[in-house]
Structures are given as structure tokens and as C-alpha cells.
Amino acid sequence: MQTDLPADYTDTPSGARAERILRSCVHCGFCNATCPTYQLLGDELDGPRGRIYLIKDMLETGEVTPVVVQHLDRCLTCRACETTCPSGVAYGELLEIGRAYMEPVAGRGLLARWQRRWLKAVVPYPRSFRRWLRLGRLFRWLLPRRLASQVPALGRRRPQQNPARKRPARRVVLLEGCVQRVSTPGVNDALRTLLARRDVAVVSVAEEACCGSLALHLGDAEAAEASMRRNLDALAPHLETAGAVISTASGCGVTLKDYGRLLASDPLYAPFARLLSDKLVDVSEYLHALDPGFKRARDFRRVAWHAPCTLAHGQKLNGLVESLLVGAGYELVPVPDAHLCCGSAGTYSLLQLQLAEQLKKNKLAALTAGAPDVIATANVGCQTHMSTDAPVPVVHWVELLR
Ligand code: SF4
Ligand code: SF4
């Protein structure tokens, strides 16, 4: 794709990167075939190719129009288009640059500005998030139907069994996550039990902060980087001695693995950011390498597996969870259109209620087509989003292993 970005913009790291990404697109349009918003809305501007053109025009002219804002807002950041693209266009990175450029002058109304500020001020902080979630559950009946259906339940902790021996063979840092800690704390509890039985000591870092993905999705690069630095301050003392840093929420993992790139221009934090990215593994990578011969839980047999976009398209980890579940004795039911997003997509399910609901409805129809006993996924956002309407339990896949 030909570009004509202003010279003073291409002199900046973001501008130079945007130009390289834009030029790698050959506008073939293959990516539209797997884009969930293009499939739902049938509008070229709601597909990746159209959005790439919108970003290019915006960066060339400096004009942030309501059309640009509307169509970039509607993108799920699912990155299914990256998986499909034959030219390797780094669409997710381009969108990140586009949103950061657009956001300060997006001209949002008062309510939309308040919503975004509220999300950034509450969700990444477990204490305040828990408080708001309790209020939300209490006054759900007062909320509009679509919003009420998005309020997840408060999660329960599981008692841990079989603590690790006094001198465990391995040591890992387990990230608690900010939303997961409140909504589904039982996931990490289940993993702790699994690891303790295999002689792995698990360290949790009390000061762990939000990974920054929420602010990043909302186009607030400054807030995202501040969050990443806070997180690194907390984790840095543990990085040298930990064999691995494990994330059980693929939505956090995809951002944490990218710290090295995201903080590359910060001379103070870049080395720690790279170290964290190198040590960060999704739980599926860790358990697969451990190869510990898991068994299935007694309650379920037939599993519908939903790979979150952040696992399948963001981290490109396909097949690991499936092989662990099958190895444990589960039967995986076929799921049509498995590459499509469930509509959770970070804050999308709160900011784009109608589209998120439609995507969830379609996804649940696909997941339950094979009559599963349970739906398994790998990210707290997908789990809580689908749980509100699913006819069978929706769990994190780690909870299915014994
Ligand atoms: S992003 Fe990739 S698939 Fe989409 S139009 Fe560009 S080159 Fe083609
Ligand atoms: S990230 Fe997802 S929703 Fe956005 S353009 Fe790509 S495929 Fe479509």
C-alpha cells in the first residue's frame, strides 16, 4: 500500500512503525473473510482492510472524523485478521497506534468519556472492582437488560490441597490478574493444587498491578505504560529466580508477552520488560512442557473448547489445551466457526453492547451444537461474558484437570 504520512510523524517511533505496517498491506481483502464485525455488519469499513484505510487516511491528513472513531471503536482487537493475512500485516499493532492517535481528539460525548474514565479507574483495581461488582449484583434489576446481563458473578476461592514439599524442585511466579482475582479466583487456586502435587512452588506477588491491557485497548497509551511500569516494579525482584512467570488469563498474557516491544524506548524499564516477556508463559505452555499425566474431573466428559482470541490469534497457541484435555480423557465436541470471537474482547462487551450480545449468542449456539457437558475457555473475560447466558457451566480449562 502506498503511503504519504507527514515527515514529522514518520520521524517518531509510532509513525515509522505505522508506515511500515501500512506498506505491508497489499489490500487483497482476504482478512475480511474471518473478521467477526465484517461478517455481522457487512460494511467494508467494519472489516480489517477498511479499518486499515481509515487509519492510513487519519494519519496522512491528521483528521479524526466521527466515521473513523465509530469503525475503530467497533473493532474487537481479536486479531483473527492477522491469522488470515498472507502478508503478515501486524494489524493489532497498527490499531494500537491508530487508537492512541485518535483518542485525545475523538470528540466523545460526556457519557462515553465518563464510561471510559470509570473503566480505567475501577476495573484494574481489585478492591474497587469488587465493591462495584457487589453494587452491580445488588442493583442489577435497575440496569437496562443488555447491561444487566453483563454483570458477572463474584468468584469463590477453592481450598488448596496438597501443598508443595519443603524443598520443591521448581519455582514459578503465578500472576493473579486484576479482574480474575475478583471474578474467578478459583482458577489459580486449582492451578496451585495441580502444581503443588508436581513439586512446583508457586509465588504470588501481592503488589502485582494491572498488566495495562485495559488502558491499551481504550487507546490510552500513557495510562497503559504507567500500569506496566507499576507491574514491573512489583515483579522485577522475582524475575531472576523464577523459572517461569505463568499467566492463566490469556488476555493478560498476550500483553505481558509484548512488554519488551511496548517499553522498548524506556531505557530504565526496557531490560526488565524484556526479561518478563521472555519468562512469561501461558499456563497451557507450562503444563504441556511439564507433561504430568492429568486425569479428567468426574463431573464432565464432553467439552466444547473456546479458544480466546488472545490465545489463538494473539499468542498463536493452538492445540496445546486441546491435547492436554484429550490426554486427560475428555471428548472434545466439534465447534463450528471456532475462530470467531465471543464478543467479550476486554471492555468491548460493555462499550458495544449490541454487537457483543450478538456475538455471544452466535458463539454459544456454535459451542452447544455438539451437546457438551461443559464449555471450557482460557480467559476470564470470555468465561464471565459467556457464563451469563450459557445453558451449561463455563469454566477455565485448568479447572477440568486433576
Ligand atoms: S491486512 Fe492482509 S489480508 Fe487484509 S487486505 Fe491487507 S494484506 Fe490483505
Ligand atoms: S481485530 Fe478482529 S474485529 Fe478487528 S478488524 Fe481484525 S478480525 Fe476484524
Image: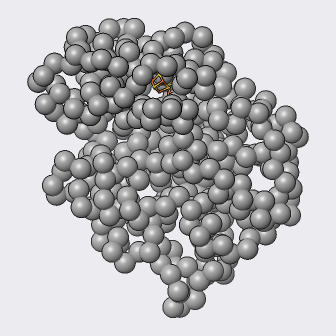
Vertical side of 310 occupied by 117: above or below: above
Image quarter for residue 128?
top left
Q: Position of residue 186 (x, y in %)?
A: 63, 59
Query: Going by the picture, which residue comes out furthest to the left?
Result: 8
Q: Residue at x 86, y 39 (%)?
A: 370
Residue 167 seen: yes
Q: Position of residue 185 (x, y in %)?
A: 58, 57
Q: Residue at x 44, y 61 (%)?
A: 280
Q: What quarter of the picture does the N terminus occupy?
A: top left
Vertical side of 87 occupied by 264: above or below: below
Q: Position of residue 232 (x, y in %)?
A: 30, 59
Q: What quarter of the picture does the C terminus occupy?
A: bottom right
Query: Going by the picture, which residue comes out furthest to the bottom?
Result: 167
Q: Residue at x 88, y 40 (%)?
A: 371
Image quarter for residue 69?
top left
Q: Nearer the viewer, residue 204 or 302?
A: 302
Residue 5 in the figure: left or right of residue 241? left
Residue 207 seen: no
Colour pattern: one colour
Label tally: 0
Q: Position of residue 267 (x, y in %)?
A: 15, 55
Image quarter for residue 148?
top right
Q: Residue at x 53, y 58 (%)?
A: 282
Residue 83 in the figure: left or right of residue 90? right
